[in-house]
Image (cartoon, rainbow, N blue to C red):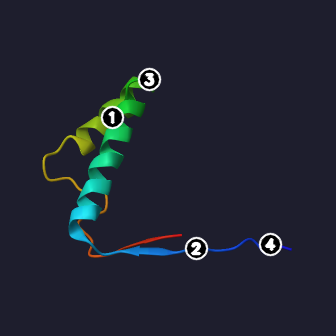
Amino acid sequence: MHEEPWSFAVIQDKNLLDCLSEGAKTLVRNEAKGGDPQRSAHALHVVDKPNFNVFYDLGALIVI
C-alpha cells in the first residue's frame, strides 16, 4: 500500500553544506580507487578542483 513514512531535512547551514560536500568528495575519491580507470580519472578530475562543491554552492539542500 506504499504507506512508508516520509522524512525530510532542510539544510541551510553553509558550514554543514560545505562539510557534507567534502565528505561526498572523499567518498568519490575512495570509490575511484577500485573503479574503471577512465571513469575514475574523470571523477577525480572533477572533485579535485579546489573550488568544486558537490552541491554547486546552493543555499539549501532538501534531503528526502
Within-10-Å neighbours for mark 1: few <14, some 14–19, many 20+: some
- Element carrying mark 3: loop
Nearer the observer, disc 1 or disc 2? 2
Read off the residue under disc 3: 34
Question: Which residue is farthest left?
Answer: 50
Contact check, label 1 and label 2, Cβ < 8 Å: no
Q: Earlier in the sequence, mark 1 or mark 4?
A: 4
- Element carrying mark 4: loop
Contact check, label 1 and label 4, Cβ < 8 Å: no
Say the numbered circle drawn on residue 29. 1
Amino acid at pointer 1: Arg
Q: Earlier in the sequence, mark 4 or mark 2?
A: 4
Viewed as shown, does residue 15 lie left or right of 28? left
Say the numbered circle drawn on residue 7. 2
Read off the residue under disc 4: 2
Contact check, label 3 and label 4, Cβ < 8 Å: no
Measured Cα–Cα span from mark 3 to mark 1: 10 Å
Q: Earlier in the sequence, mark 1 or mark 2?
A: 2
Viewed as shown, does residue 46 lie left or right of 6? left
Q: Nearer the viewer, residue 57 or 4?
A: 4
Within-10-Å neighbours for mark 3: few <14, some 14–19, many 20+: few
* Image coordinates for residue 9, horizontal then vertical, percent: 46, 73
Contact check, label 4 and label 2, Cβ < 8 Å: no
Q: In which quadrant will I find the N terminus?
A: bottom right
Whether residue 56 is visible to the viewer of this picture, yes or no, is no
Measured Cα–Cα span from mark 4 to mark 2: 14 Å
* Image coordinates for residue 49, horizontal then vertical, percent: 17, 45
Whether residue 46 is visible to the viewer of this picture, yes or no, is yes
Amino acid at pointer 3: Gly
- Element carrying mark 2: loop
Say the numbered circle drawn on residue 38. none
Q: In which quadrant will I find the C terminus?
A: bottom right
